[in-house]
């Protein structure tokens, strides 16, 4: 109960900070204990957690204060719409670099690697083998193991517990409904995110017409669209989401499309998270235009007090809204844990038929392993540890890079501000190509992801992405330090 109370206090103070109600010094520990009718130890635990999350800072003999975040200009992705036939391009060298033992792969994203999960997964695998998952049975459910689907539905519905009724009702373009949780009948188990995306695309007939995608776009999404030779319309992200909705409308008026591919929670590469109100606005827009939304949900990688809600969970309350949510366990358990899922809202039968037709059945052993994690409440604890270590890595990376960022900010260097996810997204001065930085980084034993990888027309040539979510060791620290020095040399030489 004490754990619940301290977490509730953390959430309450975070909401006060976000709303501006609390903007300077926090109440003293004793004042807060009296105000919230809590024990002193509970308040101390909550304040320490807020400090770890970066929401407050402790000043010796003064108390706790709201952390001041310097206002930075938002990275502008422009308003140029791009319509292309997706084909194979750049990025092959970056992919090869991931397997080079002589390079530090800051170009990859495998956040699950920040923890060593081998012993846990081996133990779960041995336990799964005891159930004889490879015995000859023909009645394995196409949808996935029922117990796993039920556990997954419960886990993914947790965000709805934190959703206030006013958030569901404030957008007048949506009908009023009580927020519903997911059920096992909304979920299909797949081999992983690639299978899930292909099922989503084929079940919506998306490949027979243009597909709209937000830009910059996740490399995983882009690579899949290239592989199937899809026709793509890129819609650049905007600083204000109402401008993005207006841009979507203008694009749809000019060239109708039936599917929009989005990454609303910790978008790759820039880490953007849409607010609940922005998500509701997107759902209303999609309903009005009869567009099916396919979301790649990385909400599990949050750093704050609660998981951001998915489009699928919001859409569950509205019976005519079509949303397919893609997720997997690459980010949380292991890149080699080949299991994923689809949450299909109002398109379940179409997705089920497509999956049954084009996909092999996912491993029963892996499904049993994952279900054991849920049954024993181990998955939640594991994700808590993962997120905590990712935030430690982020703070270490920013501590190293801050002097470089401060020095080069007047020259136009920008870095994304994130609240979750495994990546940092940098913008170089307009006339400097990140491919030049790539060449210099490779020569120094580091690989980065040039910005051109996150568009179909290389429009983000002066951007690049790195990950901080790798095992932290001396090589990682030295690699981040080297990157900072390379940025100084590159931009200083350009100015000189």
Image: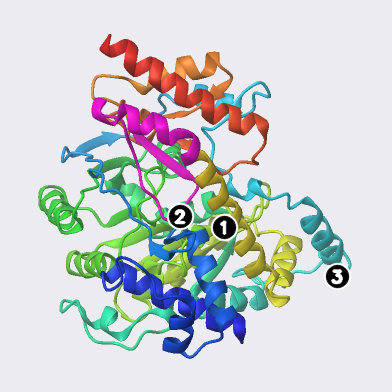
Q: Is residue 380 above or below residue 462?
A: below
Instruction: Give x and y (percent) for residue 314.
Output: 35, 74
Against 169, is 313 above or below? above
Front residue of this view, candidates 177 and 491: 491
Compare residues 71 and 147 and report the one nearer the observer. 71
Q: Which residues are magenta?
A: 398-426
Is 374 magenta? The answer is: no
Q: Report which residue position mark 2 lands on.
A: 420
- Residue 209 seen in render: no
Residue displayed at 59% across by 65% down: 189
What residue appears at the point 24 percent right and 19 percent down from the top-left corner? 431
Q: Residue at x 10, y 48 (%)?
A: 254
Lower sequence index among marks 1 and 3: 3
Quarter of the image with the N terminus is bottom right
Q: Quadrant of residue 258?
A: bottom left
Q: For mark 1, what is the residue? A: 387
Cβ atoms under marks 3 and 2 closer than 8 Å: no
Q: Are marks 2 and 1 in contact (CB under 8 Å)?
A: yes
Q: Is residue 408 magenta?
A: yes
Q: Tell me the crowding category of disc 1: few under 14, some 14 to 19, or many 20 or more residues within 10 angstroms, Cα based.
A: many
* Residue that label 3 marks: 131
Q: Mark 3 against mark 2, which lies toward the viewer?
A: 2
Q: Compared with residue 356, is residue 225 higher up or lower down, i.e. above or below?
A: above
| Mark 2–mark 1 distance (CA, rounded to whole Å) | 8 Å
Residue in the foreground of this view, choosing between 429 and 456: 429
């Amino acid at each position: 109960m004490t754990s619940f109370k301290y977490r509730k206090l953390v959430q309450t103070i975070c909401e006060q900070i976000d709303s501006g109600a609390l903007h300077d010094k926090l109440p003293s520990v004793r004042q807060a204990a009296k105000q919230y009718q809590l024990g002193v130890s509970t308040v101390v635990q909550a304040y320490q957690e807020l400090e770890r999350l970066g929401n407050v800072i402790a000043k010796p003999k003064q108390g706790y204060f709201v952390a001041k975040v310097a206002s930075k200009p938002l990275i502008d992705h422009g308003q140029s719409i791009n319509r292309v036939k997706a084909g194979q391009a750049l990025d092959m060298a970056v992919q090869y670099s991931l397997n080079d033992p002589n390079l530090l792969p800051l170009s990859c994203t495998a956040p699950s690697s920040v923890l060593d999960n081998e012993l846990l997964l081996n133990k779960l695998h041995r336990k799964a083998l005891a159930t004889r998952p490879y015995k000859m049975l023909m009645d394995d459910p196409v949808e996935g193991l029922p117990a796993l689907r039920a556990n997954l539905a419960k886990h993914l519905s947790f965000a709805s517990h934190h959703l206030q009724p006013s958030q569901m009702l404030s957008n007048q373009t949506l009908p009023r409904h009580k927020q519903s949780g997911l059920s096992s009948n909304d979920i299909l188990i797949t081999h992983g995110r690639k299978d899930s995306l292909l099922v989503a695309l084929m079940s919506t007939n998306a490949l027979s017409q243009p597909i709209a995608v937000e830009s910059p776009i996740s490399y995983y999404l882009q690579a899949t669209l290239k592989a199937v030779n899809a026709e793509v319309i890129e819609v650049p992200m905007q600083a204000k989401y109402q401008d993005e909705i207006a841009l979507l409308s203008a694009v749809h008026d000019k060239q109708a499309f039936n599917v929009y591919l989005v990454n609303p929670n910790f978008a790759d590469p820039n880490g953007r998270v849409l607010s609940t109100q922005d998500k509701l606005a997107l759902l209303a827009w999609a309903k009005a235009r009869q567009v099916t939304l396919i979301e790649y949900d990385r909400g599990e990688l949050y750093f704050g007090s609660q998981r951001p809600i998915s489009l699928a969970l919001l859409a569950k309350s509205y019976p005519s809204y079509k949303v397919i949510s893609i997720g997997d366990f690459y980010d949380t358990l292991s890149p080699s844990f080949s299991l994923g899922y689809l949450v299909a809202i109002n398109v379940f039968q179409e997705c089920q038929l497509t999956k049954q037709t084009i996909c092999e059945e996912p491993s029963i052993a892996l499904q049993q392993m994952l279900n054991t994690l849920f049954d024993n409440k181990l998955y939640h604890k594991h994700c808590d540890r993962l997120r905590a270590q990712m935030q430690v890595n982020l703070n270490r990376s920013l501590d190293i890079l801050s002097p470089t960022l401060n020095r080069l900010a007047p020259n136009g260097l920008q870095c994304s501000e994130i609240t979750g996810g495994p990546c940092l997204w940098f913008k170089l001065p307009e006339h400097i190509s990140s491919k030049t930085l790539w060449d210099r980084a490779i020569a120094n034993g580091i690989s980065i992801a040039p910005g051109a990888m996150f568009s179909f027309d290389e429009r983000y040539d002066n951007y690049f992405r790195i990950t901080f979510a790798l095992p932290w060791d001396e090589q990682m620290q030295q690699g981040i330090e080297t990157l900072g020095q390379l940025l100084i040399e590159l931009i200083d030489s350009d100015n000189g």
